[in-house]
Amino acid sequence: MKLAYADDVHGTTEIYEGIIEAAAANEADVLVFGGDMLLHTRRRSSISENAEMQKRNLDDIIALFSEANSAYGMETIFIFGNGDMRINEGYAHAAAARAKGVHYLKNNYLVMKDIAFAGYPYVKSILYSVRDWEKTDTPDSPSPEPKDEFMAGWYSVKPEEGTIYDDVTSLLSRAPPNKKLVLIAHSPPYGTNLDLSKIDDGEAPLHIGSKGVRMAIEEYHPFAAFHGHIHESNQLSGSYFDLIGSTIAFNPGWASPHRVNLIFFDTEKGMHSLFGCIDEYGVTHST
């Protein structure tokens, strides 16, 4: 099975169109998106206004995925990320279910041939403006406190309890037998090529990924893991993949602002490649 993977498109339909075109040209079987699917919320808009804006954006995106299935036979799997409002989760489930060849995952599995895909959206608490998909990382992790009202952010629904580590270990422990397990988790694993970020100019890059995700991967050894969230990590580390034991993990990120990287992964041969990046006009560039 040939997978085409990208993350953090943030709602730009032209980028989705470019990804679909490149995936079709390279005969991908499945499109996989690792969260932050939708347009950024606006701080001056109300929760209901932002929710409606993201719903409209989601409708446009799912229509593109359905058209890709009709035209090329490609299935699409997606999860939400920290920028996607959780109040719309039920809407996403229903919209994907109505569409042809489109699948929304959260804390569950989708089996295609010999692959079992698992989806997980949460990131560790760092006080984003939308906090719907934040959780404490591990049972030993402290919960950050906002320094001011701006950093406090907001929730569109009541927060869920628990930790990322507990969630992901529970998810992986329920894997269907005799299938290659592919984890799609928005947060990259801590201490890898996939989670480097530069908070301030002039300072050394820091690892800011999830220890809970890494610990779960180390315990359950999925065949592959796909991540996003940290756009710049590929540029800082020089690599879009890393190994955690026997698991190959990916975070293609961005080549530059508004240029989303696309990778291909052959699940039978274990081969992968960085295809290039798609800009906000849907144009493909080599990297």
Image (spheres, rainbow, N blue to C red):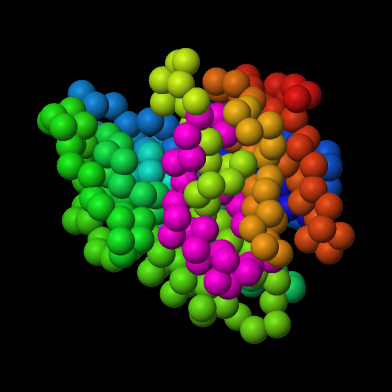
Asked if residue 116 lies left or right of residue 215, the reply is right
Image quarter hosting the N terminus: bottom right
- Which residue is at 60% across, 21% downward? 256
Measured from the top left, where is residue 224 in percent x and y?
A: 67, 60
In the rendered image, the vertical position of residue 271 relative to residue 129, given as above or below: below
Measured from the top left, where is residue 79 in percent x and y?
A: 49, 53
Asked if residue 160 lies left or right of residue 232, the reply is left
The magenta segment? 205-234
Depth check: give the residue in front, 240 or 204.
204
In the rendered image, the vertical position of residue 173 relative to residue 263, given as above or below: below
In the rendered image, the vertical position of residue 232 relative to residue 24, given as above or below: above
> Can I make out residue 77 in this image?
no
Q: Is residue 218 magenta?
A: yes
Depth check: give the residue in front, 74 or 136.
136
Which quadrant of the structure image shows residue 148? top left
- Which residue is at 27% across, 39% downward? 127
For the view shown, which residue lies furthest in the left direction? 149
In the rendered image, the vertical position of residue 206 relative to residue 186, given as above or below: above
Q: Is residue 248 magenta?
A: no
- Which residue is at 67% across, 63% downward? 245
- Which residue is at 48% across, 58% downward? 213
Asked if residue 166 lies left or right of residue 266, the reply is left
